[in-house]
């Protein structure tokens, strides 16, 4: 089964941008439907994403929806599912840029708030001898990666973007086990989650919110859950 014109154009739009807020992606799909004279209903969005995934998973690709706390919004993210996440992300880039990408990820993950300043980020190139990457080039590719949704910038601080969090979850868990948390409910990496006051386990806000619709205890230690979920 091949993709329809609407599905193909929508996939190209999301893949080229890296990620969109779900609300934005629905508007994009509605506009595409209008341009190719295809009906749009409340079910069109979910059906379109499902149909695209059924086709592209054979190529180790997927459209995945995640909650992204820094923007307090759900994002539709285009991700690559191949095993070697770090080599695939910038396969057409020079080695020194890929090394800088790794260094930037590490600096963010090892920071307490999971944010680092733009200046600190560009200065990473001077801490690694032998990497022929200028600070001006470092700043330029940081901007490129922000556009591609690998990173997110606010008030001259950068953190992991929705695409990096989604695509490199397994890499973070294996390479930075001491620095990252995994949500006990979905087993995926968790940043900026909600923490149980008793056992200090961290959960994705959406995961624990769904769980608490049926239960009132912490799913890990089973003490009464006291952390507000709507803060």
Image (tube, grey):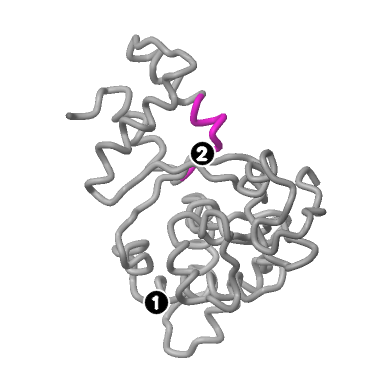
Residue 221, position as x, y percentages in the image: 69, 64
Residue 104, position as x, y percentages in the image: 54, 71
Residue in the picture at 41% in, 38% down: 14
SS at badge 2: strand
- Give the residues in magenta: 19-26
Residue in the picture at 62% in, 61% down: 159
Residue for badge 2:
20
Residue in the picture at 52% in, 54% down: 186
SS at badge 1: helix
Spot the residue most to the left: 1
Residue for badge 1:
96
Quadrant in which the N terminus appears: top left
Majority secondary structure in the magenta region = helix
- Density class for disc 2 (Cα within 10 Å; few <14, some 14-19, many ≥20) is many
Confirm whether the magenta stretch covers residue 106.
no
Residue 78 location, quadrant: top left
Could you tell whether 173 is left or right of 210 in the image?
left
- Density class for disc 1 (Cα within 10 Å; few <14, some 14-19, many ≥20) is some
Could you tell whether 37 is left or right of 219 in the image?
left
- The vertical placement of 15 against 178, above or below, is above
- The vertical placement of 89 against 128, above or below, is above
Residue in the picture at 34% in, 75% down: 95
Residue 40, position as x, y percentages in the image: 43, 13
Residue 39 location, quadrant: top left
Residue 166, position as x, y percentages in the image: 48, 54
**In contact (CB < 8 Å): disc 1 and disc 2:** no
For the image, the number of numbered tags is 2
Viewer-side residue, 110 vs 150: 110
Q: Which mark is residue 50?
A: none
Give the Cα separation between the discs numbered 1 and 2: 29 Å
Q: Please identify, in this view, whether the residue under mark 1 or under mark 2 is nearer the observer.
A: 2
């Amino acid at each position: 089964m091949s993709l329809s014109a609407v599905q193909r154009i929508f996939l190209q739009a999301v893949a080229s941008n890296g990620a969109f807020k779900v609300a934005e992606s629905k508007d994009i799909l509605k506009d595409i439907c209008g341009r190719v004279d295809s009906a749009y209903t409340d079910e069109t969005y979910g059906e379109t994403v499902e149909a695209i995934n059924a086709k592209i998973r054979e190529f180790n690709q997927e459209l995945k929806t995640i909650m992204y706390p820094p923007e307090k919004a759900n994002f539709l993210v285009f991700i690559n599912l191949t095993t070697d996440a770090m080599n695939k992300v910038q396969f057409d880039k020079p080695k020194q840029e890929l090394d800088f990408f790794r260094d930037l990820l590490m600096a963010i993950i090892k920071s307490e708030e999971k944010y680092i300043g733009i200046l600190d980020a560009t200065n990473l190139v001077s801490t690694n001898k032998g990497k022929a990457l200028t600070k001006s080039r470092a700043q330029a590719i940081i901007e490129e990666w922000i556009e591609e949704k690998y990173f997110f910038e606010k008030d001259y601080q950068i953190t992991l973007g929705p695409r990096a969090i989604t695509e490199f979850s397994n890499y973070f868990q294996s390479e930075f086990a001491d620095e990252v948390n995994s949500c006990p409910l979905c087993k995926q990496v968790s940043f900026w989650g909600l923490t149980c006051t008793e056992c200090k386990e961290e959960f994705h806000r959406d995961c624990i919110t769904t769980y608490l619709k049926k239960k009132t205890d912490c799913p890990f230690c089973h003490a009464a859950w006291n952390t507000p979920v709507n803060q």
